Image (cartoon, rainbow, N blue to C red):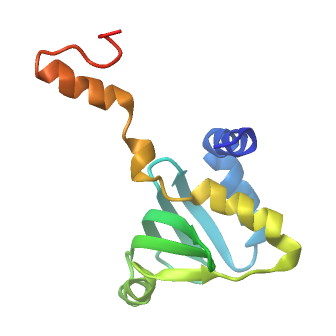
Amino acid sequence: MNFKTGLIKMAIKWTPNRLIIWVANIILKGIAELVDFSFDLEARKSYVQIQLLGESETIEVWLENFTVVSDEAGHSLIIEQARSNRIWLNNLLSRIAGKAWKIPVIPQFTAEIELICELFKAESREEAETPVQEDNVYAEQGEPGPAESK
């Protein structure tokens, strides 16, 4: 992760939900009102509660385990789990969950798409395995780890 991506992740984490709700409600005026919102980039979870204009009940949507996968052909968005408190929306979300959705290549937005892909890229399994975990294996066996034997 580069400095720019780390800085943006920190800004996302520190942005107050009230600010996001306030700005969203300015944009959605006359259509809907954002009631509640949470977004956890590290846990890959998002929650939105919205009140459509003229409706008596709110709509809730939960997204979990979303990621961007990159390969030679381009980038794809994958949302592993998506659900709602509305049956019709649950049925719609079930059709998009678990599938790779190709992100279109738009030349004018190449830099922005690359940044978004960096923010939401899948954590590789190699990055998840750290030398500390390997040292724990040696400690469980009662032997010194590679760092301790030097």
Q: Residue at x 73, y 58 (%)?
A: 115
| Rendered location of residue 38, percent (x, y) | 53, 53
Q: Position of residue 66 (x, y in %)?
A: 48, 65
Foreground: 137 or 66?
137
Residue 124 appears in the figure: yes
Q: Is residue 140 above or below residue 117?
A: above
Outermost residue, right side: 108
Q: Nearer the viewer, residue 127 or 26?
A: 127
**Horizontal side of residue 8 vs 130, given as left or right:** right
Residue located at (76% from left, 73% from top): 29
**Residue at the limit of the structure toward the left, as seen here:** 141
Residue 65 found in image quarter: bottom left
Quarter of the figure with the N terminus: top right
Image quadrant for the C terminus?
A: top left
Residue 104: % across, % down: 70, 83
Q: How many discs appear?
A: 0
Residue 54: image location, x then y, percent: 60, 83
When the figure is inspected, residue 39 is found, relative to residue 133, above or below; the finding is below
Out of 12 and 90, give the one closest to the viewer: 12
Classify residue 55 as left or right of residue 15. left
Q: Is residue 103 above or below residue 130?
A: below
Q: In which quarter of the view is residue 25 placed? A: bottom right
Residue placed most toward the observer, 129 or 145: 145
Residue 59 visible in the current orientation: no
Instruction: Tell me which residue sits at (37%, 85%) in the image.
Output: 94
Q: Is residue 144 above or below residue 111?
A: above
| Residue drawn where x is 54% and y is 51% of the image | 41
